[in-house]
Image: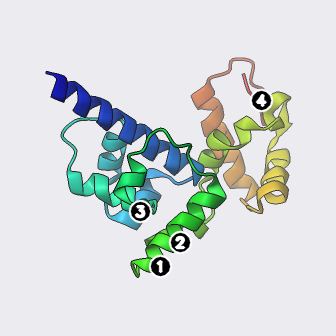
């Protein structure tokens, strides 16, 4: 019984760490699937700590983020910053003659950016318009999304948040 509990705990910790690493880089499940050939469904299962996930898939994800196994499984160490993680990945993949890391250079999906970065800023503390979000992304991060795409993602975001006080074309943290 103890072994099952230890394995379960390890699966959960492994999944949490992998999810946090994906969020640090603002990568979607699709991005990870494209880079590693591990299906989105499997990535989600691993990140959820589900039992029975294929060891090769877990290893592919660990190696994708540029970790040697002993360093990855040291859960006592802090997670790297975005800059540190990107450098680690570049070094690891170049040493192994892999180009999987190149996905880190693509512009992230706006919904990932909103959920992982923008909500942690003061941007949505007051009501903002689509153009405010567009300008903020461009000025702060150098990401340029079309006004229409920004509006669509914000509508998706607002629906997820389900704020009954939401005003047309304006957005705010609840």
CA gap between label 4 and label 1 equals 42 Å
Tell me whether circle 3 and circle 2 mark residues in contact (CB < 8 Å): no
Residue 153 in percent (x, y) is at 64, 45
What crowding class fits label 2: few (fewer than 14 Cα within 10 Å), some (14-19), or many (20 or more)? many
Query: What residue would you read off at disc 2?
Result: 90
Question: In front here: 39 or 4?
Answer: 4
Left or right, 154 with respect to 1, comes to right
Tell me the residue that label 1 is attached to: 94
Which residue is identified by label 4? 172
Task: Give residue 37's quadrant in the image.
Answer: bottom left
Question: Which quadrant of the view contains residue 164?
Answer: top right
Q: Earlier in the sequence, mark 4 or mark 1?
A: 1
**What is the secondary structure assignment of the residue under circle 1?**
helix
Question: Helix, strand or loop at disc 3?
Answer: helix
Q: Secondary structure at mark 2?
A: helix
Position of residue 26 relative to residue 5, above or below, is below
Q: Are marks 1 and 2 in contact (CB under 8 Å)?
A: yes
State the separation of the CA atoms marked 3 and 4.
Answer: 35 Å
- Front residue of 173/121: it is 121
Residue underneath mark 3: 64
Residue 169 position within the rendered picture, expressed as x and y whole percent measured from the top left: 78, 37
Look at discs 4 and 1 and give the one toward the viewer: 1
Q: Are marks 1 and 3 in contact (CB under 8 Å)?
A: no
- Quadrant where the C terminus is found in the figure: top right
* Distance of label 3 from label 2 (alpha carbons): 10 Å
Q: Earlier in the sequence, mark 2 or mark 4?
A: 2
CA distance for labels 1 and 3: 12 Å
């Amino acid at each position: 019984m103890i072994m099952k509990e230890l394995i379960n705990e390890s699966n959960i910790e492994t999944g949490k760490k992998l999810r946090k690493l994906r969020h640090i880089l603002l990568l979607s499940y699709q991005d990870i699937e494209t880079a590693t050939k591990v299906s989105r469904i499997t990535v989600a299962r691993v990140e959820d700590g589900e039992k029975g996930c294929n060891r090769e898939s877990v290893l592919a994800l660990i190696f994708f983020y540029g970790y040697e196994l002993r360093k990855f499984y040291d859960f006592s160490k802090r997670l790297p910053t975005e800059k540190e993680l990107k450098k680690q990945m570049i070094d690891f993949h170049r040493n192994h003659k892999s180009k999987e890391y190149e996905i880190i250079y693509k512009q992230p999906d706006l919904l990932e950016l909103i959920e992982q970065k923008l909500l942690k800023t003061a941007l949505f503390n007051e009501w903002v318009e689509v153009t405010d979000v567009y300008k903020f992304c461009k000025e702060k991060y150098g990401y340029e999304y079309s006004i229409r795409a920004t509006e669509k993602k914000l509508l998706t975001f607002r629906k997820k948040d389900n704020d009954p006080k939401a005003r047309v074309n304006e957005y705010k943290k609840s």
